[in-house]
Amino acid sequence: MEILKQRIIEEGVVVSDQVLKLDGLLNHQVDPQLTMTMGKEFASLFAESGVTRVVTVESSGIAVAFATAFAMGVPLVFARRKKTLLADPDALCERVPSFTKGIVTDIMLSRQFMNSEDRVLFIDDIIANGDAARGLIKIIERSGAELVGVGIVVEKCFQAGARTIREQGIRLESLVRIESLENGTITFAD
């Protein structure tokens, strides 16, 4: 997506050779028009997959996942990172480290929102090491649902996350692939 690449160049902040800050696009502020365009792109990529639900992990993936679910006409379900007083005691849970937050959290998804009849598309904002993605994939598998694919807005190719998911035989589509952040410069793959 050329428009997304351009916005990343204009608004992305290279924090280090491992970290790209996209607060103005994905993680703090959301551009509704760009987000809906990304959702339509994912919907197009996975149009023939028979998706019945879109799933993501709170919170940065929610906007793009919502746009995708809207474009596909299916519900959006998101895995929570924090347990609430109203949390389902029988929720599917997985403990995952967060690369950008530097902490380990539990992600939880209520069994009532996903079952063996579902064909699930997992959408997320950025993939680095892929820990949260692998955690949610385990939850989807335990629910009995079929994972039809993973859509990622920004893939950091120099980190192993996307590669390890593809090695599991899972279809993973990225809107933008970043090869390097070395010397403060964003270098796109392709």
Image (tube, helix red, strand yellow):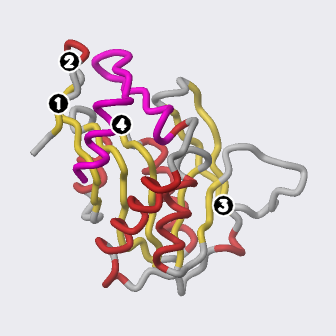
- Local secondary structure at mark 3: strand
- Which residue is disc 3 drawn over? 109
CB atoms at circles 1 and 2 under 8 Å apart? yes
Which residue type does callout 4 highlight? Answer: Ala
The earlier-in-sequence mark between 3 and 1 is 3
- Local secondary structure at mark 2: helix
Q: Nearer the viewer, residue 171 or 73?
A: 73
Above-or-below relation of 15 to 173: above
Q: Please identify the quadrant where the C terminus is shown.
A: top left
Above-or-below relation of 56 to 43: above
CB atoms at circles 3 and 4 under 8 Å apart? no
Image coords of residue 30 (percent x, y): 54, 45
Residue 41 covered by magenta stretch: no
Image coords of residue 172 (percent x, y): 29, 59
Which numbered dot is residue 187?
1
Which residue type does callout 3 highlight? Answer: Leu
The earlier-in-sequence mark between 2 and 3 is 3
Please, which residue is most extreme toward the top here? 183
